[in-house]
Amino acid sequence: MPSQSPTSAPSAPVLVTGATGQQGGATARALLSAGVPVRALVRDPATERARAVAALGAELVKGDLLDLDSVRRAAEGARAVFSIQMPDLNDLQGDSEWVQGRNLIDAARDAGVTQFVHTSVSGAGQHQTAPGWAEGRWAAMEHYFTTKSGLQDRVREAGFRHWTLLKPAFFMENFLSLLPNGPEGGLATVLEPGTKLSLIAVSDIGTAAAAAFADPERFHEVELELAGDHMTMTRVAEVLSEVTGAELTAPSMTADEALAAGMPQWGLGHVWMNAVDQPARPAFAQALGIPLTGFAEWAGRHLGPAAARPA
């Protein structure tokens, strides 16, 4: 039997970036639950979030995706990488996200990492087919999608033995922020009643990533448009009403009205979703045997009577 290299042995850790955030955190938890060793890249191991990840059994390694040397050190001896980057919210037209992704891809390749699972966003790479794109209607989003699709290309071309692209849809968790005054206060959003949303629970992103790490051959070159449900905003409001007991409707709000009602500033980007139906669908993950969370199940867990309420 041929011996395994240190970076492909099952005992070698999976390097998880963003482990103190939503997608990386979900992936770390899913892997640790399955008994897979996790090495979490964190900027400050002393933070409460980092300590919480360590308490689950992860090894913490200090580093920053903008610091290539620290990423190289973190990648040494890892068998696989979970890759996520975020743009600099103070400089949305800057190159921070691109540099982070490039550093991680290059460091992992040079360290001999054999599997790379990268999370992007639903529709990246198809965005130029959106209505009005060629006419400049979505010029403000060009940098965002160019960066996302460019990093996807870099993963495809890096030469990893196994690679997977996860392209998650609209997070169900976003609705917690779109109910700024609780369910009784109603939805504050520019999403229109007839807008159809592809929805994903963040925990399912971790489930999908863990499935890919468990079966690298099967998930090699899979580009998974990831959603757990697909429904209109009108149906979203109906589900939230059923779960919470509050009478919610899908509002028709202008941007100014939604902001005044408490919608976070980032909600302005949802205007895109009124015009573009994200291609992610539940059937794609189901075909791969990945269990999914429907919106009603998610809402019951997070907003139903048994959900924890802030004191």
Image (spheres, rainbow, N blue to C red):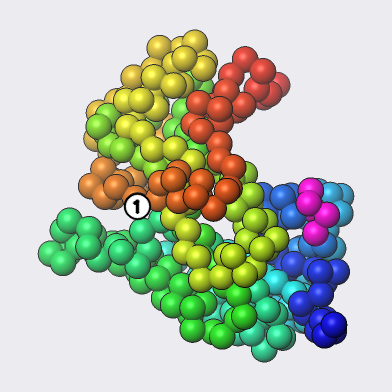
Q: Position of residue 305 (x, y in %)?
A: 62, 15
* Kind of residue indicated by mark 1: Pro
In the picture, residue 190 is in which quadrant?
top left
Residue 34 sits inside the magenta stretch: yes
| Residue 108 highlighted magenta (yes or no) | no
Looking at this view, name the residue that lies furthest to the front: 1
Q: Is residue 204 above or below residue 78?
A: above
Q: Look at the image and give the residue range highlighted in magenta.
A: 32-36
User: How many numbered discs, if any?
Assistant: 1
Examine the residues drawn in magenta and state their main secondary structure.
loop
Disc 1, SS? loop
**Place of residue 176 in the rendered image (x, y in percent of width and height, measured from the top left):** 52, 33
Q: Residue at x 36, y 71 (%)?
A: 146
The residue at the point 22 percent across, 58 percent down is 130
Q: Position of residue 173 (x, y in %)?
A: 53, 38
The residue carrying mark 1 is 279
Does 206 appear above or below 90? above
Q: Nearer the viewer, residue 92 or 152?
A: 152
The picture places residue 143, in percent across and down from the top left corner, at 35, 69
Nearest the viewer among 106 and 224 is 224
Regarding residue 152, the answer to whether it shows in the image is yes
Residue drawn at (35%, 52%) of the image: 279
- Residue projecting furthest to the left: 135
**Quadrant of residue 283 in the image?**
top left
Task: Choose between 138 and 57: the one closer to the eye.
Answer: 57
Residue plotted at (51% across, 17% down): 243
Q: Quadrant of the C terminus?
A: top right
